[in-house]
Image (cartoon, rainbow, N blue to C red):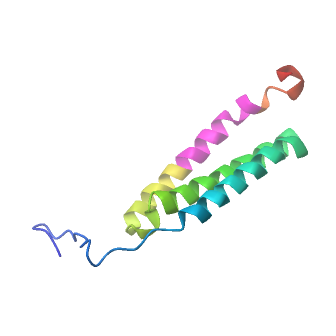
């Protein structure tokens, strides 16, 4: 089905894709959160921050794919999602010096 200017309108009767396994995604997010918390205690601060940021990107991807249903959207939505993730990466890179400037001894 198309509208007057040629944009395809999805038909809800035929385009239903079902729901992702929300319980499995939730357990994966909890597991990744637990790993990121443990990294703060097991590794040096530099390595822990790198691992925690990497895990945060994976968690953001899981949320985008499953809870926001991005995996069922057209290619243009993927480009927007990648641009957002790039912006997030640049933000994390920008505040990295603020995070690492305080040592654990100062925080105590």
Residue 89 visible to the viewer: yes
- In the figure, 103 relative to 31: above or below? above
Q: Which residues are magenta?
A: 86-99
Residue 4 horizontal/vertical position (percent): 9, 68
Which residue is painted at 86% across and 21% down in the image? 108
Residue 67 horizontal/vertical position (percent): 48, 58
Horizontally, residue 55 falls left or right of residue 42, namely left
Identify which residue, 3 or 19, lies in the foreground.
19
- In the figure, 15 relative to 25: above or below? below
Horizontally, residue 17 falls left or right of residue 26, namely left
How many numbered circles are shown?
0
Query: Is the magenta region chiefly helix, strand or loop?
Result: helix
Identify which residue, 108 or 89, lies in the foreground.
108
Q: Quadrant of residue 77?
A: bottom left
Which residue is painted at 70% across and 47% down in the image? 53
Horizontally, residue 75 falls left or right of residue 7, namely right
Residue 90 horizontal/vertical position (percent): 59, 43
Which residue is painted at 66% across and 41% down in the image? 93
Q: Is residue 30 magenta?
A: no
Q: Is residue 87 magenta?
A: yes
Determine the residue located farthest toward the front in the rendered image.
23
Horizontally, residue 77 falls left or right of residue 97, namely left
Identify which residue, 26 or 101, lies in the foreground.
26
Which residue is painted at 53% across and 46% down in the image? 87
Determine the residue located farthest toward the bottom in the rendered image.
14
Residue 15 horizontal/vertical position (percent): 31, 75
């Amino acid at each position: 089905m198309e509208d007057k200017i040629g944009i395809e309108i999805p038909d809800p009767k035929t385009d239903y894709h079902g729901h992702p396994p929300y319980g499995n995604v939730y357990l994966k997010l909890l597991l990744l959160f637990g790993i990121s918390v443990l990294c703060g205690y097991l590794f040096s601060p530099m390595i822990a921050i790198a691992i925690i940021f990497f895990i945060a990107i994976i968690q953001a991807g899981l949320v985008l794919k499953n809870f926001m249903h991005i995996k069922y959207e057209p290619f243009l939505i993927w480009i927007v999602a990648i641009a957002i993730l790039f912006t997030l990466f640049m933000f994390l890179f920008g505040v990295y010096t603020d995070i690492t400037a305080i040592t654990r001894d100062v925080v105590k």
